[in-house]
Structure formats: structure tokens, C-alpha cells
Amino acid sequence: MQIKHRHKGFTLIELLVVIAIIGMLSTMAVVALNNARVKSRDAKRISDIKQFQTALELYFADKNDYPTGSGLTADKQLCNTDTGFDIATNCAAATVYMGKIPINPTPNGATYVYTRVGQDSYTITFTLEETTGNLPSGDRTASESGIL
């Protein structure tokens, strides 16, 4: 009587199938992660702009004017100084409305650009990578009226 020995283990085909499935799942996870990163950057952009708008409105409530400065960089602050430099590097003895002006998260997008349009108006331009909420992707403008 012959006894058949069964080898325990996986065949090469079974191993290749499992590796292929794992590869497809990891590819889908990377794509989903990249999508989440884009949405996260856009959400941060909108949050930054809304915070900046709030600071501008607080400033306007105190001075009945919008700041004259420009150049939104991370080392600047929005403050009420008597020297006329309202977006400044150092607001030591002034009322601070925003301790650190936000900058565009990288990669992609464009630098936030603040422009004073007369005494009672301003614009902030920024870029969204994808449609976010009811805002389509591309160049967007925020003003005292909201985000367009």
C-alpha cells in the first residue's frame, strides 16, 4: 500500500495571486490618500481666508478702514499701529488682530494676495485645487462680501 505525502504550503500561482491583490489594494489606498491630501489643503486654504477675513473685519470695526499693507508672508502680523504699516513684522506695542498671517499650503495653489480697494473694501485672491463645498476649483476671490 502506497502512502501519499501531502506537502503543506502554497503554490507559486497562489502566492502570485495574493501579491497581485495586495498590490492593487495598496495602489487604491495611495490614490485615496492623495485625494485626501488635496481636500485637506483646500480646506486649510478656505479656513485661512475666513480667519483673515475675520481679522480684517475686527480691524475695520476699530479703524473704519482696511489695512494699507500688503505682502502676506508667514512672518507678518495684522495689527493696529500708528505708523501706517498695518501688516507688519513686529506689532509689539499695537493691538494684534491676527498673530500670524497664514500662507498657502504647499504644494500647488498660489500665494494669497491681499489688496486694499479703497477705504471700505478689499480682496484676497487664492487658488483651490478641487471643488470644495460650493466653491469650484481654480482662482477664487474673497472680499468683505464673502468668498466668490
Image (cartoon, rainbow, N blue to C red):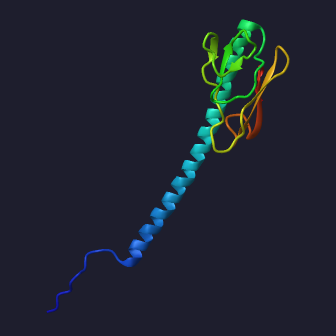
* Most foreground residue, 101 or 121: 101
Who's the residue at 51% across and 62% down the image? 24
* 48 in relation to 14, above or below: above
Residue drawn at x 83%, y 14% as measured from the top left: 119
Residue at the farthest left position? 1
Q: Position of residue 71 (x, y in %)?
A: 73, 28
In this rendering, would 18 be left or right of 83? left
Would you place residue 17 above or below residue 115 in this image?
A: below
Q: Looking at the image, which is closer to me, 17 or 130? A: 130
Looking at the image, residue 119 sits to the left or right of residue 27; the answer is right
Quick one: which residue is furthest to the right in this view? 118
Q: Quadrant of residue 5?
A: bottom left
Within the image, what quadrant is residue 117 found in? Answer: top right
x and y, in percent, of residue 50 in the image = 67, 24
x, y percentage for residue 110?
72, 39
Front-lying residue, 148 or 58: 58
Say how many tags the image has. 0
Q: Where is residue 93 in the image (x, y as percent from the top left)?
A: 62, 10
**From what the image shows, is residue 124 above or below residue 25?**
above
Quadrant where the N terminus is found in the figure: bottom left
Quadrant location, the C terminus: top right
42 lies above or below 14: above
The image quarter in which residue 112 lies: top right
Q: Can residue 103 be seen in this view?
A: yes
Residue 130 appears in the figure? no
